[in-house]
Amino acid sequence: RYLKGRNEIYAHAHQLLKLAEQRVRVVQFFGGPRPPEGYAQEAARILRSKRDCGVEVTYDAYLVVAPSRIPTTFDEATRKRFEIYKEQGVGDLIGVHVLSMEYPEGFGFDMFIVDRKHAHISFSTSERLADLQRGITFENQELVVGDLAEWFERAIERSAKRYEFRESG
């Protein structure tokens, strides 16, 4: 299915999260398009609801950062987002990882993988646009998503480092 526009892309991510049974992995290029306000709150609420039903789903976020352009707000923004999940009582389900790599400024690309069964890939159509504009989704396509997950494990997971939150204050 073809996704058009930021709202449809992020609403679809929430739909896929509701289908998750074990594991969600997402990669996001930091400094590019950002999720809408309220995205993390809804994702945390979904994870909490699943936990309340006895389904523990881990959610691993892989943030790609360009070493030459790490924003001064990176640590604060990352901590603030993580706190949203902690407030819902699902902080232990969240993993934050960082992959350092140079990429073009304004590069918009996200990938969302659920249980080796569902995925979507989203991207911006121009570096001048602040939001993701298009997405391609794969639902109940274990062969395709399984191959995508294997690529993710080799290219992203293997190279990323677990993010260590610094003490605030």
Image (cartoon, rainbow, N blue to C red):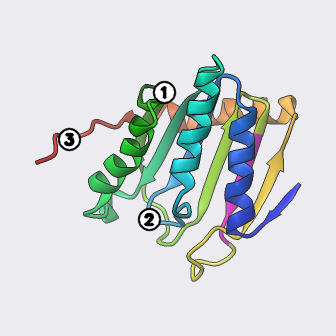
Badge 3 crowding class, 10 Å Cα cut-off, few under 14, some 14 to 19, many 20 or more, is few
Q: Which residue is mark 3?
A: 166
Q: Which residue is mark 1?
A: 93
Q: Is residue 160 left or right of residue 114?
A: left
Q: What amino acid is at disc 3?
A: Arg
Residue drawn at x 69%, y 32% is 149
Residue 127 sits inside the magenta stretch = no
Q: Which residue is mark 2?
A: 31
Q: Quadrant of the N terminus?
A: bottom right
Q: Which region is colored magenta?
A: 119-124
Label 3 or label 1, whichever comes before in sequence order: 1
Distance between the Cα atoms at labels 3 and 1? 19 Å
Residue drawn at x 58%, y 23% is 51
Q: Position of residue 9 (x, y in %)?
A: 71, 59
Quadrant of res 21: top right
For marks 1 and 2, give the one nearer the viewer.
1
Q: Is residue 75 above or below residue 85?
A: below
Q: Is residue 168 above or below residue 110?
A: above
